Amino acid sequence: MHNHLHLLVSSMSARGKALEVGKEVVRILRGAGWDVTVQVTRSSDSIPAAAQNADTRLVGAVGGDGYIAAVAQGLAEDPDRVMVPFPGGRGNDLCRSLGIGTDSLTHAKTLTQPDLENRIRAIDGMWIGSKRQLALGVVSLGIDATANRFANQSRFRSGPLAYSWGAIAAFTQSHPNEFVVDVDGVVCDLPGWVCSISNSGWIGGGINILPTSDPYDGVLEVLQVAPTSKARALPLLAKVLGGRNLDSPLVQVISAREVHFMAPTGIVAMADGDMVAKVPFTVRVAPQVVRVVI
């Protein structure tokens, strides 16, 4: 029963790009004999509920990282359901991290191959806050979160262009924060430009900010970029946000399974392209939380 797919398509992702991608995905799959039920979702819809209520084993998601994470939330911890993600956003970092890439049509064509069952893997995620919102990529606080917010406000359809513009705008307005964090029961002062929690390591439309992150290992990483002057911070942050080099005494990586942000109160956290929380809040690893076709 591999040939029946309930396909959720975002009407909002990448300013309508997901709708265009979704049409082509449906054309390819139906042409290969698949039975595809299409559901276009609006901003007012509950995406986790739509995924949970789908009456098929395979549930597809065409949209950006936040949309795919919301579909995953609806299928979370259900061993009988499998998510089929198709990159349809600006950044598409989740699909990059899983090796799917950024070409939805190529991914759709691979579904017609006979090895589908062998390509199903359970990936980790992160439960955020008391309402248990699921994130799959990186929970960002600091300049990378500010860059994400500016990128969301831009008119660029390209994720890398939007994030590059956002990073420049963020640097002119940002400053280090005095983060206080409880990491697996140990309270730490982690002041700095960046204090983020990584599951996949990828942000910003192709930036592997933390290459040691592995969405299959059941462990998260806390990334801190310590305070320094803007003159010193600029080249360092360019390397960190460019995913090129973490070999600096100002950069610290800590393995963790549960992280509670205690201060400064009100700081905004972004994950998978969307705002997900404000300090104080907790992030917990969710090992093998959803099964995915990669």
Image (cartoon, grey):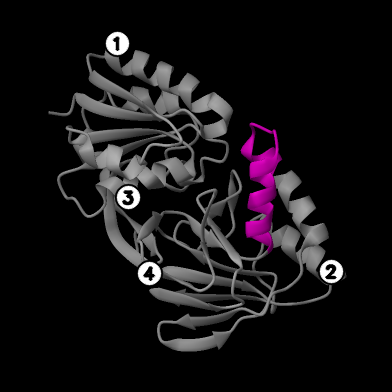
Q: Which amino acid does the dot numbered 4 rest on?
A: Arg
Q: Which residue is mark 4?
A: 284
Asked if disc 4 and disc 1 are in contact, CB closer than 8 Å, the reply is no
How packed is label 4: few (under 14 Cα within 10 Å), some, or many (20 or more)? many
| Image coordinates for residue 80, horizontal then vertical, percent | 15, 45
Q: Earlier in the sequence, mark 4 or mark 1?
A: 1
Q: Earlier in the sequence, mark 1 or mark 2?
A: 1
Q: Which amino acid does the dot numbered 1 rest on?
A: Gly
The alpha-carbon separation of the residues under discs 3 and 2 comes to: 39 Å
20 vs 114, left or right, is right
Taking the spot 47% from the left edge, 22% from the top edge, the residue there is: 19
> Is 149 covered by the magenta stretch?
yes
**Which numbered disc covers residue 31?**
1
53 or 176: nearer the viewer = 53
Mark closer to the observer (3, 1): 3
Q: Earlier in the sequence, mark 3 or mark 2?
A: 3
Taking the spot 17% from the left edge, 28% from the top edge, the residue there is: 2
Q: Which amino acid does the dot numbered 2 rest on?
A: Lys
Q: Earlier in the sequence, mark 2 or mark 4?
A: 2
Is residue 134 visible in the rendered structure shown here? Answer: yes
View extreme (top): residue:
31
Q: Which residue is mark 3?
A: 73
267 vs 40, left or right, is right
**Which numbered disc covers residue 230?**
2
Mark closer to the observer (4, 1): 4
